[in-house]
Each structure stands twice: as C-alpha cells, then as structure tokens.
Amino acid sequence: MKRVLAFVMAFMMLFAISVSANNPIVKEDGNGNRIYAGDPAAIVVDDTVYLFCGHDTSTTNSYYMPEWLCYSSKDMINWKYEGVPMRASDFSWGSAADAWAGEVEYYKGKYYFFMCKNSTGISVGVSDNITGPYKDHLNGVKLVQPGWTRGKVGWDDIDPTVWIENDEKGVEHRYIAWGNSNLYIAELTEDMKSLVDLNGDGAVNGGDITEIHIQDMPNTTAFTEAPWFYKRGDLYYIFFANSWHEELSYATSKSVTGPYTYGGKIMEAGASSNTNHPSVIDFKGKTYIFYHTGAMENGSGYRRSICVEELKFNDDGSIDLFYESSVGLDGTKVFISPVSDPSKKIYHGYFSNTIEPTAYPAGSLVFCDDFTVNKADFEWEIIPGRGNEEYVSIQAVNKMGYFITNYNSHVKVLHDNDATRETAQSMTFIERDGLCGEGVSYESMTEKGMFLTVVGNRVQLTSGHDKEASSFIITEVNNPDKLTVSADGDGIHLKGTYTGDKRNVLLYVKNEEGTIVDFKIVRINESRMLDYTFEPEKGGVYTVVFGTFSENVEF
C-alpha cells in the first residue's frame, strides 16, 4: 500500500485568456440578432433539453413580450435557436404583447404549452411537436378565469406550472399551480381543457382551487411568483421567486399539494434585473437550475437574459445559497493579483440590487486586498473585448454583465446600460506583457498610456510608472467540485485545487463495504493544489471523500 500527497504552486501565468462566457445562454436568434428573453421553462425530451422563454422586445422600462421563443441543447453548453413556437396573439383574449411565463408538458402523445397573458387569465396551447407550432387548445376559452381566485392582489393569475403523477394507489393526477402573492393549485382534466370539479358543485370555479401556504417563512420574505415543481427521491420541492426585488427560494413537502415548509433562499436579488424566475430539470445525471438576469448590454428587468447553473443538494436535501455566475457551466474564472504583492487579489465592492432600473450606472469601486467578506467578489472572467474583440474585458463573475470600466478616468465596476460603442470601449483594455517584465498589464482603450494600477488598496488608472503595481498575475480559480478522481494501474488518484475556508481537511477512502481503508488530515498551504494517490490492496469500487467532495471510482 502506498500514499502520495503533494501540493504544487498554483500561480499559472495566462497571457492571452480568451474564454467566452457561457452565461447568458440565450443571446441571439437564428440570424445572429441580439435577443432578450426571460421566464425560462425547460423540459427534457429524450437526449435533448428544450428551453422556452418569453421574448422581451421592450425599449422602455415596461414589459413588451409578443411571443415565446424556443432553444434546444444536447449538452447544456451549445444552444440552438428553434424559432417561435407560439405568440400571444394566438389567443383571442388579452393583449398581444403579454407573452408572460409559461411551461410545456408532454402528455399522452401531445405537448401542452400552459401560458398566461399578464393577469388576464391562464390557458393552454397544444402541438404534436415539441417546438410547435402550438394552437389555442380551448378556442378562446380560459382555463383559469381571474375572478375565480379573488386574492390579495388583482394580478395573481400568472406563471402556471404543471405536475403529473400517479398516487400511491396508482391514480393519475394532473396538477396546475400558479400565482403572484398568493400560490394556488388545482387539478386538470385528462383532456387538459378544464379544471377538475373537486367540490362537486357541477361547475368549475374558485371552489375547485386551493391556496398553498408555505410554512416557516421568515417575516422578511414572502412568496411572490414563478412557482416550479421538482421531485428528488420522495421529497417534493417548489422553487419560486420571493420578495422584491426578487430573490429565489425553495420549500419542501412530502406531497405535491403540501403543506410546504420553507427551505431557504438560494439566490439573492440580481444586480441587473428586478425579477427572477426558476426552472429546474434533471439531465444526464445532474440537476440544473435556469434563471434570468438583465446582464446583457442594455439589459434590465424588462430586457432579460437566461442563465443556467448546476444545482447541488446537501445530504439532507437542503440547498445552499449560490450566486449568479457569468462563467456558467464551462467558463473560466480567475483571481487577479498585483505583482507588487501576490498575496492580495483585486475585488469589486459589494453592492446588491436595491436600485430602480433607471438608476444606472450602478456598481462599485475596485479594491485590492487579501480579505473581503464576500469571497465571490474576488472572482473575475476575462473575455474578448466589448469594444474590440482583439482586446479584453474583465467581468465580475458574481455580478454578471458588470465590467471593470474607465468611468471618467476612475476605475469602477459598471453595467453596460446603453449598448453604445462608447460604453463598450470604456469596458475594454489592451492586454500587454507586464510592464515590470512579469505577468500582464491592462491599458485603457479609451485613454491610451493609462494602465490599471493598484494604488494603496484601490485599483486606479495611472501612467504605469509603478510597474509592479501595474502588472498582474492571473490565477485560474478551481472549485472543490472540479476535483477529479481517476484510477489506473498505479492506484486511485485525486487531483485539483481546494478553495474552501478550512486550514485542515479530512481526506479518506472507503471500500465497497463502507470500511475506511485510508485517511489523513490534509493541511492546506498557499498553493492549495492537491495531488493524492492511494493504492488499494484489491480491486473494487471505492469512495474518495475530501471535505464536502465525494466520488466513486472503480479500481
């Protein structure tokens, strides 16, 4: 039996990083035109994910959504534009500009597109094909009439979501839920044309609709809208947008109809959109959550962009808070440290979405230190330049769409709120070899001869006379969940980088019987790189555990 454990220096010089951001995943139509879209609703059919969304075409701070769009992907990275499956005008009632949130479900050979138009009612389209075209299944009749609910607000009949299952007796149930401020649930008839007359009064009305109450919600939050059902094992989840500006939270239950218990907040209010909308699916062994931001150029809560992250569950089924992320599923995030003091990293000042959409430019100053309360503020993504793709732009990973900007000769993190050439160029830098002979330096595209420089604890624009402070080391950030386990003739290998907070981390290996066959306490040093090998005495399936990371491997 042998063990090898080594930490290797992690500073990797990257002189020409050019990684396109995966998020947002919806950027263009089939002709390459910029697309804004919100309210994601995903469904898996065979080996393909289909994503439906409302097309934001507003040029003002109001909603204007004439149609729904469809995209598809076989790998969650590359997305294909599938066109317009349905329009608001396909339904004779309500406005032709209110293609609000909907959801597609497959049932007995057909696809059903449950939709709403603002709060004027809920109905459903039908098609033989997942990508449409869909037609009004009820020929002008509404599935849910607004007068049936008479809730606390007059706009609570929006955002339908559907769940179909057999109960413990094998009886099929088709549930539809929806709401804003109030959360409602009812049952659908088998032909998907009506609600079930649950109270037996011979008519479909408000008496057939039940309100779902989420227990144990803190006084500082409340259900807002965008419910989405999901099941993991025997536990039902309902994901939803809460509060204003909207965060994302979840609740759990042993039954789809509740009662539900509040689980917690999983995403804070975004930096660029006042709303959010979750959609959760399983695909090829992983769980993903879709959401929307206003991250694209000239984006806002009325011109949104759809993003996706892998959703991770703890052993007890709970979900931790995570941040919107520009890198998505395949991008690369980095730390940026000055050559003058590599122990420090640059970061943006903390800010949240507490502003009105018209209050741009929002953002913060850029600092440099070895500590910040919110560690995600240290993370950046370097992408092709906003104003010139031969150059680079530096995006805050957890404030998607916010870039290091030359703002009137001051360095700030700002959102591109107008999509003008001037704004794009102010967010673009010419990447040079480090002025001190090491690393890289960033010259402003709009003020030639001026470089990003660490001055005290701030990043500012200077002439670069302090060459070490104007030169930077770029270090790729590896997450614990990017650790890799492999096996060959030499043994079982665990490699990667640890970025957690603990100084000492338990590492152990279990065999098929659950017996720990190797363990040690790993002391984390400055390099944080892990290279571990364990040679078992016999073949079999082994579980390698390092902190919160766990993976099986066959030796």
Image (cartoon, rainbow, N blue to C red):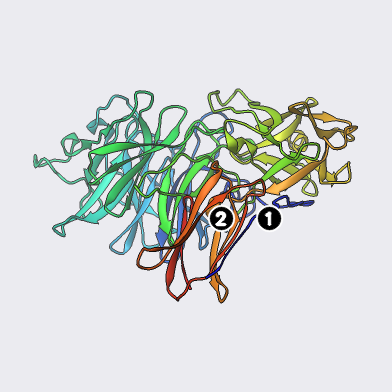
Q: Is residue 377 above or below residue 26?
A: above
Amino acid carrying label 1: it is: Val
Evaluate if marks 2 and 1 touch, with contact meaning CB atoms under 8 Å apart.
no
Furthest residue in direction front, as rendered = 1
Between residues 251 and 228, which one lies in front from this camera angle? 251
Q: Is residue 457 visible?
A: yes
Around disc 1, counting alpha carbons within 10 Å, would you say few (fewer than 14), some (14 to 19), or many (20 or more)?
few
Q: Position of residue 109 (x, y in %)?
A: 31, 64
Residue type at mark 2 is Lys
- Where is residue 235? Give x, y as percent: 28, 49
Q: Which residue is mark 1?
A: 8
Tag 1 secondary structure? loop
Question: Is residue 385 shown to the viewer in this render?
Answer: no
**Residue 200 pos. (x, y %):** 9, 42
SS category of the residue bearing label 2: helix
Tell me: 555 left or right of 167. right
Q: Quadrant of residue 112?
A: bottom left
Disc on the earlier residue, 2 or 1 = 1
Front label number (2 vs 1): 1
Q: Quadrant of residue 278?
A: top left
Q: In the image shown, does 138 or 391 lie closer to the viewer?
A: 391
Q: Is residue 228 left or right of residue 504?
A: left
In the depicted structure, whether residue 37 falls above or below residue 133: above
Which mark is drawn over residue 555?
none
Q: Which one is in front, 225 or 215?
A: 215
Judging depth in this view, the residue of 287 and 279 nearest the camera is 287
Mark 2–mark 1 Cα distance, whole angstroms, equals 17 Å
The residue carrying mark 2 is 482
Residue 497: x %, y % from top left: 60, 52
Is residue 101 rendered to the left or right of residue 378? left
